[in-house]
Image (tube, rainbow, N blue to C red):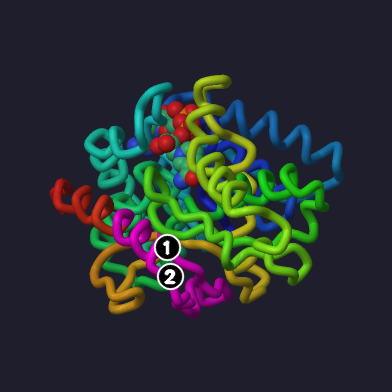
């Protein structure tokens, strides 16, 4: 497998590290800043050498080097500063991502694409429209990261092993994310049996707010997103057919059309093999629809 990561900043280099540690393939780490991807590649290769992992990672400033990629991860762009929402990044990052799409068209048209740059859902839509590719092959990573956080909070609150927690987070990767307490469990036992309604509300709020807290403390989120992207790639490379939250193009599912938003998807060798439609209750639907509206508004502001 060849995995190209476009954007060798904090998250891009973490994606490269996580993919190689899992031995998913060889990495091409691309950035416009000279020296940065080469330096990151050296540092990661040194770790891999000591571990005895033979995946190679190469840094480059030349988009041509993405030729014959099986996967392209788009993580180029600016991150939010303390106090900003993900939507505040729309204009700047849409221009960057459009430029990246032109390069993908030239050099890696047949690859599967995972979008990471924020705001995640509108930019995943932008990439699907720009590449005119199959909607099963282009997807966004946002919900997987929200899920990592939700799981951590569930474990802390209940005192149960992280290993036994199954959960789901859908909707917008942003202000209207929807951690689904009702569809979460601890070893198959509904989470609602372990926690009160108040605790459930607290869990949801904490999951929504925690990224901003990390950003205010250390400037960016790095390790958890790198891991989340590599989990998605691993699922596809190994044809695991696991159900993960993914930003996918909806065409009728959840009563929505022509919009990308986080939903549970079966990920296998074909990419998004199925979108799972959950029966949301009134309150869940309210948040989901707010997410849809927010992404729609952003899409309207994109010049495609
Ligand atoms: P960063 O600033 O550390 O790295 C971004 C890199 O992109 C820089 O090295 C920059 O030179 C590069 N870049 C800019 N334009 C480029 C181009 N045209 N071609 C190649 N490289 C280019 O930022 P960080 O923290 O790595 O975040 C990157 C993006 O990922 C941000 O938009 C951030 O909001 C988003 N993000 C998304 C997450 C998600 O769950 N979807 C989680 C964390 C971050």
Residue range (magenta): 262-291
Q: Is residue 263 magenta?
A: yes
Q: Residue at x 43, y 71 (%)?
A: 280
The residue under label 2 is 281
Residue 261, position as x, y percentages in the image: 37, 60
Observer able to see residue 61 = no
Observer able to see residue 175 = yes
Place residue 226 in its image quadrant.
top right
Left or right of residue 111: residue 44: right
Q: CA distance from mark 2 to mark 1?
A: 5 Å
Place residue 57 in its image quadrant.
top right
Q: Are marks 2 and 1 in contact (CB under 8 Å)?
A: yes
In this view, the residue in front, 197 or 54, is: 197
208, above or below 266, in the image:
above
Secondary structure, mark 2, is loop
The residue under label 1 is 284
Residue 42, position as x, y percentages in the image: 67, 31
């Amino acid at each position: 497998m060849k995995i190209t990561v476009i954007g060798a900043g904090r998250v891009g280099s973490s994606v490269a590290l996580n993919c190689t540690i899992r031995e998913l393939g060889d990495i091409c780490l691309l950035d416009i800043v000279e020296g940065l991807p080469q330096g990151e590649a050296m540092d990661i290769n040194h770790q891999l050498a000591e571990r005895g992992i033979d995946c190679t990672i190469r840094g480059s400033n030349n988009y041509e080097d993405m030729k014959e990629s099986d996967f392209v991860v788009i993580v180029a762009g600016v991150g939010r500063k303390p106090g900003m929402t993900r939507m505040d990044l729309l204009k700047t990052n849409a221009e960057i991502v459009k430029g990246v799409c032109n390069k993908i068209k030239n050099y890696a048209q047949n690859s599967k694409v995972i979008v990471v740059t924020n705001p995640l859902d509108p930019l995943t839509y932008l990439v699907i429209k720009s590449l005119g590719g199959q909607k099963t092959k282009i997807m966004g990573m946002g919900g997987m990261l929200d899920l990592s956080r939700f799981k951590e909070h569930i474990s802390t609150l209940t005192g149960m092993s992280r290993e036994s927690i199954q959960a789901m987070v859908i909707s917008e990767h942003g202000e209207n994310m929807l951690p689904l307490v009702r569809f979460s469990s601890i070893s198959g036992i509904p989470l609602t049996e372990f926690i009160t309604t108040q605790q459930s509300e607290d869990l949801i709020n904490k999951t929504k707010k925690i990224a901003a807290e990390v950003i205010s403390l250390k400037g960016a989120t790095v390790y958890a997103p790198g891991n989340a992207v590599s989990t998605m790639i691993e699922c596809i490379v190994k044809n695991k057919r696991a159900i993960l939250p993914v930003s996918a193009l909806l065409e009728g599912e959840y009563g929505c059309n022509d919009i990308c938003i986080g939903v549970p998807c079966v990920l296998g060798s074909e990419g998004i093999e199925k979108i799972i439609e959950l029966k949301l209750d009134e309150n869940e639907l309210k948040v989901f629809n707010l997410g849809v509206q927010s992404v729609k508004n952003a899409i309207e502001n994109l010049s495609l």
